[in-house]
Image (cartoon, rainbow, N blue to C red):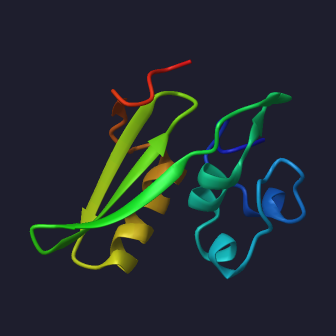
Amino acid sequence: MTIRDKIGNSKALKSNPLMAVDPCGFAERYPGIWEFICQHAYNGKPIETSKVIFFVDGNKASLCLSDRHQGQVAFFTAETFGEALEGAENGLQSESLDWRPDKKYPRR
């Protein structure tokens, strides 16, 4: 099972050939985000890896999660980047992020 089937499963991340890079401490702490950005295959087919962009907006820490395979984006804003990462991780795990169409990467 992958993040694209049901969000998050840290045990599946260790030594997983579907991941573009090896896991590290980040993968242990944020398994859903790690899988989201590193998975390069889904259902046996190659997919474009996703990305997370960190930025500051109005003195708030913000993340943009870009799912280039599905052509959608979600944002999470908090007081600190640590809180933003925790919130985005929880949102991925609970499938509660507000995903919207991404004009730059339309759905494939």
Question: From the viewer's perspective, is residue 72 above or below residue 53?
Answer: above
Direction left: furthest residue: 58
Identify which residue is drawn at 58% across, 68% down.
30
Q: Give the position of the N terminus as an image quadrant.
A: top right
Q: Is residue 81 left or right of residue 60?
A: right
- In front: 49, or 11? 49
Identify which residue is drawn at 73% across, 77% down.
24
Question: From the viewer's perspective, is residue 18 above or below residue 108?
Answer: below
The image shows residue 59 at horizontal and vertical percentages of 12, 75
Q: Is residue 15 left or right of residue 75?
A: right
- In front: 5, or 51? 51
Identify which residue is drawn at 54% across, 52% down.
93
The image shows residue 27 at horizontal and vertical percentages of 67, 70
Question: From the viewer's perspective, is residue 85 above or below residue 104?
Answer: below
The image shows residue 18 at horizontal and vertical percentages of 83, 47
Q: Is residue 20 left or right of residue 65?
A: right
* Image mark count: 0
The image shows residue 58 at horizontal and vertical percentages of 9, 68
Identify which residue is drawn at 56% across, 18% down.
108
Instruction: Please tell me in which quadrant of the rendered image residue 57 appears.
Output: bottom left
Question: From the viewer's perspective, is residue 82 above or below residue 103?
Answer: below
Instruction: Please tell me in which quadrant of the rendered image residue 42 appears.
Output: top right
Direction top: furthest residue: 108
